[in-house]
Structure formats: structure tokens, C-alpha cells
Amino acid sequence: DRGLEAVAWFTAAIRIAPRHADAWANLEFARGKSDLPPADRGDLTSTLDRLVSSLDLAESEWLVLVMTLVLAAAVGFWAVRGGSLARRLVAVALVLVAASLPPWIHNLRRAGRDDVMIVEAAGVQAWSEPRKSATLLARLEPAAIVERLDGLPGWVKVALPDGRAGWIEEPVAFPLDR
């Protein structure tokens, strides 16, 4: 069964084209077939996450640039004309700039990462060193996304959820940067 690998492929596709409806539908279908919870649970947190991640890096940069230009125009209007209308326009422009920042920050944080997804149905163990006789640090669940830090033949060093680094076997780490 390669259901988790399909989940990883569709997750990678959504990172490239975050608003691709077919990719989202296929991701949810693959997650259902793999007995995983939906990627979009429909709660407020999932909705906000999907909203913030709905733009790619270039789109979010353009949005911040345009909103900053709107703010500059409003400040210029306020400087030349003055008055309560101009002050309200500046306030609205500030809100628009603030609203445009979360997608950009989200994309900047993800841009430097080399994430991998666990595609082993039983999950995978993370070791302190790249050998099975090392100390067991954690168990990563199927479809967990972790940052790849380094690699050796047959092994991948990843950032564990608790902040430590651990080693997992390479075949179970699907690179999401495609």
C-alpha cells in the first residue's frame, strides 16, 4: 500500500500550488484511505492555517508590497490634505498591511526548511545516532512532517517535535520540496 506516499505527493503539490482544488481533494481522499484525519479539520485553527498558507512566497511578497504602497499613498494624502478622512485612510491602510504580513511570514519561515514526511504506516523510530543500536529518542507518527537537517547513506537527521535532533532511516522520509 502506497497511500502515505500519495499523501506526501499531494502535500508537496499543495506547497507548490496552495489553492489547487483537485490537489486538496486528492489529499483528503488519500488521507482518508490511509486512515489519517483530514488535513483540513474544518475548525478555526485549520481554517486560519489554510488562509495563511493560501499564497505562495511570490504572491505573499507582492501582497505586502502593494499594501505598503497603499499605506504610503494614504500617509502622503494625510500629509498633503490632512483631516479625519485621511487619518481614517491611514488607519485602514495599516490594518491592510498588518493583514498581509502573516502569509508572508509563514512563507519565509517555510522557505528555508527542507521538510520530509514520514511515509511508514507503522510510524518510525528516531535514534540518537544513525544506527539502530543507539538510544531511542522518539517515535514519529505516520504522515508527520519534520525538518530534514542532514543525511548519511541510508539515514536522515531530522528535527524532532521537542527540538532535539534524531536519525531516521531514509526510505521512510519523503522529501516535500519537489
Image (spheres, rainbow, N blue to C red):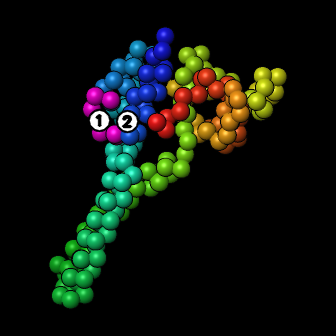
Look at 18% across and 87% down and name the residue there: 81
Label tally: 2
Q: Is residue 139 visible?
A: no
Look at 39% across and 19% down and name the residue there: 30
The answer to whether residue 158 is above or below residue 25 is below
The answer to whether residue 121 is above or below residue 18 is above
Q: In the rendered image, which quarter is residue 80 located in?
A: bottom left
Q: Element at badge 1?
A: loop
Q: Is residue 89 visible?
A: yes
Q: In the rendered image, which quarter is residue 141 located in?
A: top right
Residue 63 image point, x, y percent: 30, 59
Residue 151 image point, x, y percent: 68, 36
Q: Element at badge 2?
A: helix
The answer to whether residue 94 is above or below residue 21 is below
- Toward the top, the furthest residue is 1
The answer to whether mark 1 and mark 2 are in CB contact below 8 A is yes
Q: Is residue 42 left or right of residue 74?
A: right
Crowding at dot 2, Cα within 10 Å, few <14 / some 14-19 / many 20+, comes out as many
Badge 1 amino acid: His
> Where are the magenta residues, as a range?
17-23
Of the two numbered discs 1 and 2 on the same chain, state the one appearing first in sequence. 2
Look at 80% across and 28% down and name the residue there: 135
Q: In the rendered image, which quarter is residue 45 located in?
A: top left
Decide which of 17, 64 is in the foreground and name it.
Answer: 17
Q: Residue 14's mark?
A: 2
Q: Is residue 158 magenta?
A: no
Badge 2 amino acid: Ile
Q: Residue 20's mark?
A: 1
Residue 89 image point, x, y percent: 21, 74
Look at 54% across and 38% down and name the residue there: 115
Residue 123 image point, x, y percent: 60, 20
